Structure formats: C-alpha cells, structure tokens
Image: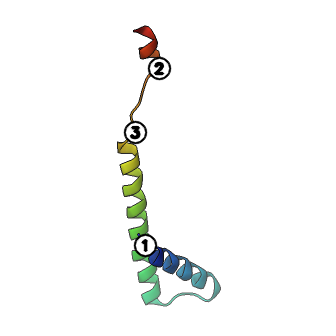
C-alpha cells in the first residue's frame, strides 16, 4: 500500500473524529482499511513463510 493511501486513511480518521464523514467517505474509509489490512496480512505471511525454526537441542545431541 502506498503512502498516499495511508495518508488518506489517517485524514479520514481525523475528519471522522472532528466533524464526521459523509456516506461516500465512510465507504472509502472502509475500502481503504480493508486494503490496508490485506497488505499487512500479506506482509506478515511473507515474513512468516521465510522463518526457519532451528532446534538447538537437536544440534547438541549430534
């Protein structure tokens, strides 16, 4: 997700707290949040897929 979309999410969050959002803005905010969460999940999955578990106890027994 690019910085422009993240900035827009923050802008809508601030506006929501201060003056409220229009229906269109609420829909945009929801879609941006879904996209953001999908990107976070994909990044986390990619990170977890590269983790290799090494058991030190197995190495000591050899």
At x 36% / y 50%, what residue is drawn?
Answer: 46
Q: Which residue is mark 3?
A: 51
Q: Secondary structure at mark 1?
A: loop
- The mark that comes first in sequence, 2 or 3, is 3
Please state the horizontal and vertical placement of residue 24, each as a whole percent of the image: 42, 89
Determine which of the numbered discs, if any, sits on residue 2 in the image.
Answer: 1
- The crowding category of the residue bearing disc 3, from other C-alpha atoms within 10 Å (few below 14, some 14 to 19, many at least 20), is few
Please state the horizontal and vertical placement of residue 53, each as a whole percent of the image: 41, 30
Q: Secondary structure at mark 3?
A: loop
At x 49% / y 74%, what residue is drawn?
Answer: 6
Quarter in which the N terminus is drawn: bottom left
Determine which of the numbered discs, if any, sits on residue 56 in the image.
Answer: 2
At x 43% / y 15%, what residue is drawn?
Answer: 59
Q: CA distance from mark 1 to mark 2?
A: 40 Å
- The crowding category of the residue bearing disc 1, from other C-alpha atoms within 10 Å (few below 14, some 14 to 19, many at least 20), is few
- The mark that comes first in sequence, 1 or 3, is 1
Q: Say how the picture is coloured.
A: rainbow
12 lies above or below 45: below
- The crowding category of the residue bearing disc 2, from other C-alpha atoms within 10 Å (few below 14, some 14 to 19, many at least 20), is few
Looking at the image, which is closer to me, 20 or 5?
Answer: 5
Looking at the image, which is closer to me, 34 or 23?
Answer: 34
Q: Secondary structure at mark 2?
A: helix
- The mark that comes first in sequence, 1 or 2, is 1
Is mark 1 in CB contact (under 8 Å) with mark 2?
no
């Amino acid at each position: 997700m690019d910085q422009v979309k993240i900035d827009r999410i923050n802008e809508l969050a601030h506006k929501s707290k201060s003056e409220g959002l229009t229906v269109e803005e609420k829909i945009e905010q929801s879609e941006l949040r879904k996209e953001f969460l999908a990107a976070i999940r994909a990044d986390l999955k990619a990170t977890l897929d590269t983790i290799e578990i090494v058991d030190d106890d197995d190495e000591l027994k050899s």
